[in-house]
Image: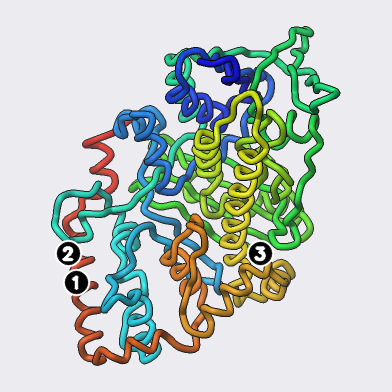
Amino acid sequence: MTDNNITSILIVGGGTAGWMTAAGLSRFIAKGCQITLVESAHIGSIGVGEATIPQIQVFNKTLGINENDFIKKTQGTFKLGIEFVNWGQLNDSYIHGFGHLGQDMSALPFHHYWWKMRKQNKAEPLKDYALNCCAAYQNKFMRSIDAGNSPLSNIVYAYQFDAGLYAQYLKDYAIGLGVQHLIADIDSASVNAQTGAIESVSLKDSTPLSADLFIDCSGMRALLLEKTLNIGYENWQHWLPTDSAWAVPSEKLNPLPPYTRSTAHSAGWQWRIPLQHRTGNGHVFSSAYMAENTARDILLSNLDTPAINDPKLIKFTTGKRKSFWHKNCVAIGLSSGFMEPLESTSIHLVQSAIARLMALFPDKNFNQANIDEFNRQTHFEYDSIRDFIILHYKATQREDSKFWRYCKNMSVPDSLAEKLELFKASAHVMRYNNELFNENSWIEVLFGQNIEPESYHPLTNMMSEQEIQQNLLNIRNVVQQCVDYMPSHNEFIHHHCKA
């Protein structure tokens, strides 16, 4: 250690964001730096972020977490993708499956060959060529095995779990590594008049807590970054008009689907997340287009299993902070912005912020170049995820409500408009700067919501239609053989990680 090293970190707020941050930092910061997490006993977490994307496996593995134990302790299930119902048109459905889509041919992406034949009614629906999609609909799951070039060798999956239990799991982990845990309410924060940096926070009993680095995990209140440092907020409601959600747990499903479901209603959408002990449900809606009581009734009347609690109302404004790291304060989680949970990105944004902070970890000088780079990368990540979520609303043919007519006809960010224009012309999807969602994700949503390109890659014409058809048939057969080999999701959980 040197005199300039960070020797104390104060995390303000618990929940998933706070305890993920505490666990991640305590795993890698050497002795000599005290990490303290302070949380209120009176303020509960949002607690609805129960579905994830595959990148969370990296976080858990980095911490050395045993997957079976983690699934047991969090009442978790496995997730192969997300089903979308009623998004393109009423009664439509498709799955955004993780992992591979078909098999590339002659160095060209699979979907170009598929689209060439589909335009002639000589190909089956896109989902029939993806292992995750087929397995999901047949309630099958397994981990990858060594099966050569078979799809079974690379099964991509995420998790569905109880976010409160995950926070408790990480809390035990972090405290075991020396994180100090305080239950207290924060009254205010003190800022240095000359530097503008936070010096300490004061508890309700006037006890001051000082630190070198402050991490704001206080949720949408953003006690430090917003209420103390007045960073400002960029509102995205003109693109993502939902601002409310009713959330309610219901009895568990049987069999357990290995996927999350998103069903579009007249002014928003409803989630369904299957866990071992219950089902997470919620109705995200726009209060400008639907009354709260109506939204509540729609949620309760569309549950697959009986509710086991009263619904809880959550209000939010989709958008992001104008900066995520300012002076000696970093916002992680909902304090940094709100991305509606349509593509299960909330927990990933926590994970990526932790990784980014570790990569650009400061000393007491708080070099502005590090801060600027952290903010630049975070802005890009938020904006690219934002575009992908806006796509779901924009790429609709629904005109059965004012809400959907607005979404269909609204202007979108230039970055999304350019992607849509390219895809509509030639079925190309360009991925920039390692953005989160890959080409297959965009393809599944665009085709799933009936956006049909005018053409496809011209080099597909170098292969005869007969050969393309035979390749498509072979891929379908291999996918189905793999699904037939897989155990049911219920069987896999019962055998390996039953809570």
Residue for badge 2: 481
The amino acid marked with disc number 3 is Ser
- Between the residue at mark 1 and the residue at mark 3, the CA separation in whole angstroms equals 38 Å
The answer to whether residue 433 is above or below residue 208 is below
Kindly report which numbered mark, 3 or 2, lies closer to the viewer in this rendering. 2
Disc 1 secondary structure class: helix
| Residue 332: numbered disc | none
Residue in the foreground of this view, choosing between 246 and 416: 416
The answer to whether residue 269 is above or below residue 309 is below
Residue drawn at (74%, 29%), measured in percent from left and top?
Answer: 223
Residue 400 in the image, given as x and y percentages of width and height:
67, 74
* Residues at marks 2 and 1 touching, judged by CB atoms closer than 8 Å: yes
Residue for badge 1: 477
Kindly report which numbered mark, 1 or 3, lies closer to the viewer in this rendering. 1
Residue drawn at (25%, 85%), measured in percent from left and top?
Answer: 468
Residue 187 in the image, given as x and y percentages of width and height:
79, 18
Disc 3 secondary structure class: loop
| Circle 3 crowding by C-alpha within 10 Å: few under 14, some 14–19, many from 20 | many
Quarter where residue 478 is shown: bottom left
Left or right of 51 on screen, residue 201: right
Residue for badge 3: 266
The answer to whether residue 394 is above or below residue 350 is below
Residue 406 in the image, given as x and y percentages of width and height:
73, 70
Left or right of 16 on screen, residue 123: left
